[in-house]
Image: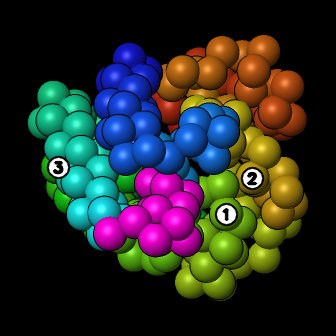
Amino acid sequence: MRLIWICRKCGVALTLAQGVPSTEFEHLYIIEIIAVATHWLTRTGSESGHSYAAQANQLILDFELDAAAEMDVFPGTRSVLATLRQADARTAIVTRNCEQAVRCVFPDADNYCDLLLTRDNVEFVKPDPRRLQLALSNLARKAAQVVMIGDGRMDMQLGRELGLTCVGVLTGSSDAASLVAARAHLVIDDIEALEQLL
């Protein structure tokens, strides 16, 4: 959580240095800040839009890769995914992160999941519902057949919007109350608890 906060803080500082008013982006996530600020710079005739976008995106990538180098998948993740695969369930990883960072943390993801959608794969990222709709299409599943597992409010809200069953996991920055407020159907302590449910 602290790393995300630092990354956003650095991104905001870079954006403000370009003259973009904070009112244009104050409630946005870092990826959306870059998109809005680039559009604002272009719209106002600034020549720095392209260089700003490149610099800001590199900032995010550096933060992600530094964090990924220190991380591993949560305990029990491979076991849960293997159980799902044995049951002929289809699974996907849908993330706002870049593919390089995901594969650094989970290099054997393809052995456990049918689909990996990162921000590198499509032009729209969560909370845009098209990302999950694309996953549903690729997995050939209807919303009523799918369980969304995530550790953030955004995951629960987006899953509910599309009619998925939403399971909140207490491994991220959101506490149980936040996940329930975001309309999680169920909240569990960790991914290992999911295997017991399966």
Instruction: Tell whether 166 sits left or right of 89.
Output: right
Q: SS of the residue at dot 1?
A: loop
Q: Which residue is mark 3?
A: 104
| Residue 141 is a magenta residue | no
Q: Position of residue 102 (x, y in %)?
A: 28, 52
- Image quadrant in which you'd find residue 74: top left
**Whole-number angstrom distance, CA of label 2 to CA of label 1:** 8 Å
Question: Which label belongs to residue 140?
Answer: none
Closer to viewer: mark 2 or mark 1: 1
Q: SS of the residue at dot 2?
A: helix
- Image quadrant in which you'd find residue 55: bottom left
Instruction: Tell whether 71 sits left or right of 74.
Output: left
Residue depicted at x 74% and y 42%: 156
Question: Does 20 appear above or below 100?
Answer: above
The quadrant of the rendering that contains the N terminus is top left
Q: How many marks?
A: 3
Which residue type carries mark 2?
Leu
Question: Does 177 appear above or below 149?
Answer: above
Which segment is the magenta one? 34-47
Question: Does 16 appear above or below 170?
Answer: below
Q: Position of residue 173 (x, y in %)?
A: 54, 21
Of the two numbered discs 2 and 1 on the same chain, state the one appearing first in sequence: 1
- Image quadrant in which you'd find residue 8: top left
Q: Which residue is mark 2?
A: 158
Is residue 51 in view? yes
